[in-house]
Image (tube, rainbow, N blue to C red):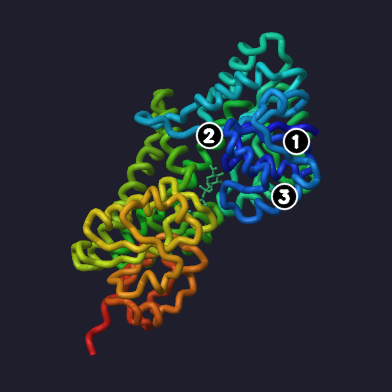
Amino acid sequence: MRITMIGTGYVGLVSGVCFSDFGHDVTCVDLSEEKVARLNAGEVPIYEPGLDSLMARNVAAGRLSFTTDLAAAVDGAEAVFIAVGTPSRRGDGHADLSYVMAAAEQVGRALTGYAVVVTKSTVPVGTNRAVAEAVRRAAPEAEFDVASNPEFLREGAAIDDFMKPDRVIVGVESERAAQVMAAVYRPLYLREFPVVTTDLESAELIKYAANAFLATKITFINEIAHLCERVGADVKEVARGIGLDGRIGNKFLHAGPGYGGSCFPKDTRALARIGQEAAVPQTITEAVIRANEATKARMVDKLRDLVGGRFNGKTVAVLGATFKPGTDDMRDSPSLTVVPALVGGGATVRVVDPQGRREGEDLLPGVTWHDDPYEAAAGADLVAILTAWNEFRALDLPRMAEAMATPRMADLRNVYAPDMLRDAGFEAVFVGRAPVERAADG
Ligand code: UGA
């Protein structure tokens, strides 16, 4: 079947490539000439493990192409996906729908036969109806339906999440649209992944509710972690103890420096806004947003306390700048709170990140970038692990301690067992676990 994917950002590109791998004939459209030229040259503009080879394979097989010509791409397509960005609008936290609505209008003008206009971008409740109106305004005679098909892929695991989803959510209003969507996902049906076919509004809300729930789970364990530090409990033990209850589950209970990324911060803000506008305040989500900001700020205090109350004159090696491993994405990363506080406080900051440097150079002024964690730690007063990249999970701790001016570690992802750090001579703090005190002299 012929599919058009509008927008080659994260979700659009991964979805387009994966649909072509299902055997569909996919044309991806983007406004940016430069981006399309790069994609046509085989360049993948984002870092996502496995995406480059999957893209190359499907381009070579003639199933996947890239263009700026939206009208030509829509002509004859059975499903037209809108996967353009919905950034948080400045000021009010609302998702900015101008790209979605502009795309809907252009699709309307380009329709030549029946098609389903599918929104994959995360959009507030009611947007699919607005998309239908925009298409209708642009093409009063056109035969089409709309569908909501939110995406649940995680950066760094996106291809696997797409190919082996926990579920596929499809919001539709007509049987005809349901059938087109069934054909789109047929390769998955064969593998028996659950497909939830529902109404438009429920599909739209499922996406926000899922992300807000996950953000709540993380924030809950982060607050428990803070409490653990005060009362002498260990958050890893607590998370394990509660996670074994099948109703709670053990996933997304890793305490850390606060959630970040392109989804949780934006979607929690948008859900809070949707609730306010519907006069049904989402008080839990609102509290989660505030608590997450407090968690990030608390990390700065933790680091400051560890170096004796002042950053001034200290050298700090920051391991990890991206919001999580396996991505080059820096959006709302805890590093954007922690690193400027270090720099602002007068510390000399060295940053190591396997993928973050390209984006990070602009976002984190006043730091030096290093490839090697040992080089960054040489002569430093503190090593802070902000992102649990594999590269930072099996460090030679005695070697690192030896190279530092004062061996101190802020392990904000609880990567290392306290004993390992103690044995290597570190003074250390964690999130939700007892610190390792400085070894007595001699
Ligand atoms: C998230 C969801 O997990 C996806 O299901 C969803 O499709 C996606 O948003 C989206 O809306 O597009 P993503 O933002 O890529 O995916 O990353 P996650 O792996 O969910 O991590 C988000 C943040 O939570 C990271 O900062 C991570 O470090 C943090 N986190 C996650 C924790 O601090 N603790 C945990 O236990 C899990």
Amino acid type of the residue tagged 2 in the rendering: Gly
Amino acid type of the residue tagged 1 in the rendering: Val
Instruction: Please indicate, yes or no, whether residue 394 appears anywhere in the rendered image.
Output: yes
x, y (%) of residue 399?
A: 40, 81
x, y (%) of residue 67?
A: 67, 33
Mark 3 to mark 1: distance in Å? 21 Å
Residue that label 1 marks: 184
Q: Nearer the viewer, residue 213 or 183?
A: 183
Amino acid type of the residue tagged 3 in the rendering: Ala
Image quadrant holding the C terminus, namely bottom left
Residue that label 2 marks: 85
Crowd rating for badge 1 (residues with CA inside 10 Å; few <14, some 14–19, many 20+): many
- 1 vs 2, front mark: 2
- Give the residue at x 55% y 22%: 101
Which of the 4 image quadrants contains residue 319? Answer: bottom left
Residue that label 3 marks: 56
- 3 vs 1, front mark: 3
- Give the residue at x 66% y 41%: 15
Horizontally, residue 199 falls left or right of residue 95, namely: right
Q: Secondary structure at mark 2?
A: loop
